[in-house]
Image (cartoon, grey):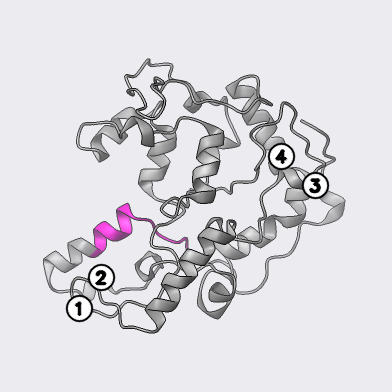
Amino acid sequence: PVFPHIIVDYKSKRLDLKNPATFRDLSKPIGALNPERMQYFKERYHSMTSSSAHDAHGEGIPPFLYGTHYSTPGYVLHYLVRVAPEYMLCLQNGKFDAPDRMFHSMLETWESCLCNPTDLKELIPEFFMGSGEFLCNSRELDLGFRQSTGERVNDVILPPWASSPRDFIRKHSKALESDWVSAHLHHWIDLIFGYKQRGPAAVAADNLFYYLTYEGAVAIDAVIESSQRNALETQIQEFGQTPKQLFSSPHPERMPDSLPSSKSA
């Protein structure tokens, strides 16, 4: 499941849904939002186009911008560790992730997705519905202490404009239904599910991922060597898979007469 980051303001005491500066540019993938980081990705991409890159089995690798993905099972568990710790422990061989890498703060999560070249995580549906239970360490799990600050990893730190997890979900959901997001969400749909997902349109939109993340990139059933097949299956299962392409032409904008009114949250 994948939902978009839509808010960039995690510092204000009041969330202004009438201000375009409150929102992320939905016409660009996460990796392209930061120009400096995008330059790094493009330089690597161009170096691949001018040389022959190969995988561990000697197969040619098509050039790509992003070697990490925006949606993986691990990312889902990263967000849901407080309500589904057993799945994280299974993935991490019986241990939680390092405290400095745990889901700790909404501001920190956004800043990492904006600046870290190995972090392109989008969000999951739980950020827009329900009670926000996944943001609370109600089981009092021992998630450790962060080396960078000495803080104990406990409840997720919310932005000042949210008074509680439930209030955060309410306002975040309202932002998703806001006039601004409703007028721009179709661009994000084009990137994730639509015509900008693959091919020349993906290259033009700076939306090109490692080739094995795309559906049908490799005919796994035709791979005879078991070790190679296991490696391919692991890549797909653990390192992300681009959703099935649903649209081959630009997705229409939401009809204006169906837009709800938006005010400050």
Query: What amino acid is labelled 3 in the image?
Result: Asp
Please name the residue that numbered disc 3 is placed on: 179
Residue 265: quarter of image: top right
- Residue at 51 percent across and 36 percent down: it is 108
Q: Earlier in the sequence, mark 1 or mark 3?
A: 1
Question: In the image, what residue type sits under mark 1?
Answer: Gly
C-alpha separation, residue under disc 2 versus residue under disc 1: 17 Å
Q: Give the residue type at disc 4.
A: Ala
Q: CA distance from mark 4 to mark 2?
A: 41 Å
Q: Mark 2 and mark 3 in contact? Answer it, CB < 8 Å.
A: no
- Closer to the observer: label 4 or label 2? 4
Give the camera-side residue of 133 and 95: 95
Write down the region rendered in magenta.
Answer: 232-244
Q: N-terminal of the two: label 2 or label 3?
A: 3
Residue 168 on image: x %, y %: 63, 28
| Residue to which mark 4 is pinned | 175
Q: Most extreme residue toward the right, as rendered?
A: 257
Q: Reading the chain from its start, which is encountered first: label 1 or label 4? A: 1
Mark 3–mark 4 distance (CA, rounded to whole Å): 8 Å
Q: Which mark is residue 220?
A: 2
